[in-house]
Image: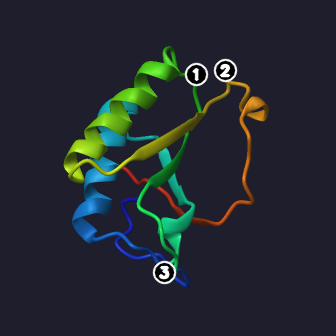
Amino acid sequence: MAEASCQNAEMRLTEAQIDLIRDVVHGVLGARARVTLFGSRVYDNARGGDLDLLVEMDHPVDDPALASAQIAARIGRGMHGRRVDVIIDAPNLDLARCPRRAPRTCDRQSRSG
């Protein structure tokens, strides 16, 4: 999510909110975490207030429930109580058990540096 713009996509997030999301995710899971925004926030013309995030990791996550809760709470506080849903995908997790919606994503990958 470090990229300031996402080409060919509309989003209802400010640059400050994008920076907050990136900083929180990297603070909890490290700079190699990739974040994808999905759901209604991807589209300017959609309604809905919650924030749906998919965090992808290339290495196992020891306590994904704790990491997800920390990310959601910190971003929610930083966005004035906005509800945040976080899904973590890592090699040691069975994401197939999670209910999936059709992916309406704007893949905004984290970049270190």
Q: Amino acid at mark 2?
A: Asn
Mark 1 highlights which residue? 60
* Disc 1 residue crowd, few under 14, some 14–19, many 20+, Cα 10 Å: few
Does the residue at mark 2 contact the one at mark 3 (Cβ under 8 Å)?
A: no
* Disc 2 residue crowd, few under 14, some 14–19, many 20+, Cα 10 Å: few
Q: Nearer the viewer, mark 2 or mark 3?
A: 3
What residue sits 57% from the left and 61% below the top? 39
Does the residue at mark 2 contact the one at mark 1 (Cβ under 8 Å)?
A: yes
Q: CA distance from mark 2 to mark 1?
A: 5 Å
Quadrant containing the N terminus in the rendered view: bottom left
Tell me: 92 left or right of 51: right
What residue sits 40% from the left and 28% below the top? 69
Identify the disc placed on residue 10.
Answer: 3
| Residue 78 image position (x, y, % from top left) | 21, 48
Q: Compared to 107, does 54 lie above or below?
A: above
Identify the disc placed on residue 92.
Answer: 2
Asked whether residue 17 appears in the rendered view, the answer is: yes
Pointer 2 or 1: first along the chain = 1
Quarter-wise, where is residue 11 in the image?
bottom left
Q: CA distance from mark 1 to mark 3?
A: 32 Å
Q: Amino acid at mark 3?
A: Glu
| Residue 23 image position (x, y, % from top left) | 27, 46
Type of colouring: rainbow
Please count the marks in the image: 3
Identify the disc placed on residue 24.
Answer: none
What residue sits 28% from the left and 71% below the top? 14
